[in-house]
Image (tube, rainbow, N blue to C red):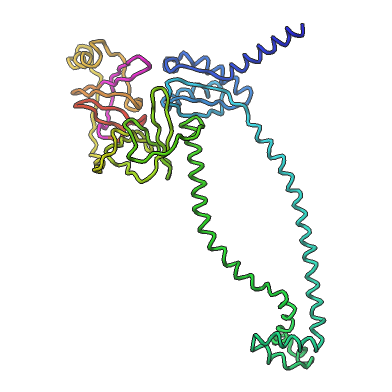
Amino acid sequence: MLKRALLIGLLLSSTAIAQQELAISGKDIESGAADARLTALAKQAAAAGKPVVVNAPAIWHDKIAATLRAAGASNVKLNDSFFENVVVRVEDKPAAKVEPAPAPKPVEAPKPAAAPAVAAPVPKPAEAPKPAAVPPPAAEAAPAAKPAATPVPAATPEPATAAESAPAPAAAPAPAPAAPTATAAPAAPPPPAAAPPTPAPVAAPAAATQGAAAVRERLERSLNEGKPAAGELGADQLQKGDIVYVEGDVRAVVRRERLYSRLFWLTGEVNLQRVEFTPLTENRYEVQDKLGSNVVLRSASAEPQIFTATVPGDGEAERGEMQKLYADGRSITRSMKVEQMRQGDTLYVGKKAAVVLRREGTDAVRYWLDGGIDLNQKGLQKDGANRYKSLSDTLH
């Protein structure tokens, strides 16, 4: 019976672990077939108070996050992935928070409270004046004051009455007590206190180095599954299809090789305004060709070119013509606004109508575009006489 109970416990624990992670195909995400599994996982995470981690292409982030949050998951972490599948898991709460427990060790800090004991020696200098009152030591202090030329004559009027009559002007007697402080000649150390300004500039590069290291670590997590980069590349080593990510002074290159991708750091000076770089988003560029010796920059953005697309009615000549050219003669029944276009969509522009072609897994889905669109905006790349490729998820 005991063995049987242990076996059942192991099976239940393996089932619980399996429910902590889901692997979902892109087709199920697009069709909504994965919504039930995402909802169940979100409810499980919400009940346990744990975050949900999603590794998926950026184009699906909004849809997955909305499904998870609707099911009660309040803490959703989204990581960009280059693979056409989705991995969703419930992340255990970090136990690292227990580490602050050793912090109580600073309780030993009270030991420096012994500093008051150091303050006790302060009264000892108070006893120093007593030897100063003896005339003979003052005479001995006079030779010590000789290096200071001026204090020597001031010490000659030794009458005690003079010291008592003018306590305030007794700047001359002050040097006499200075004899004890002369032993404490460490008064010279104040100049080193002025030295700290020089180290200050050195700290700035150190801080910059730490900042770059933090950026690289973050890019390795988001672009390379936390693994270190494969090395460094110069601008002349870039290849067609490379994706360049820019964050501050750090430039990362993701290169796809068959079914895998590799991460490199881009070094040296490179102008991302060159025609060989196509902007995909604000800080993301695709290399269209190897960099040539002649530097040619992309032209400044042209004036807006607004095309107002309308959905043609049944029986209109342009409807039949567009369906024949871009839908293999089949009827296009769906429509979308320009705000619904995504990166990777292809736009075909006619006289008054426009067709949007979207790849969803192995399927090609076509829509009529309904409304105006700026054909000269940064997020569209002209790819033919009347064909445009969407480079962004935020077209207008």
What is the x, y in percent for residue 117?
80, 63
Vertical order, 110 against 81 (above or below) = below
The N terminus sits in image quarter = top right
Q: Residue placed at 43% from the left, 42% from the top?
A: 250
Query: Residue 264 appears in which quarter of the rendering?
Result: top left
Question: Residue 143 versus residue 369: which sits nearer the camera?
Answer: 143
What is the x, y in percent for residue 158?
76, 92
Residue range of the region highlighted in magenta in the rendering: 355-376
373 vs 134, left or right, is left
241 vs 99, left or right, is left
297 vs 110, left or right, is left
Magenta portion: prevailing SS class: strand
The C terminus sits in image quarter = top left
Q: Residue placed at 26% from the left, 38% from the top?
A: 275
Magenta residue check for 363: yes
What is the x, y in percent for residue 380?
29, 31
What is the x, y in percent for residue 108?
76, 50
Query: Residue 133 appears in which quarter of the rendering?
Result: bottom right
Q: Do we see residue 300 in this rendering?
A: no
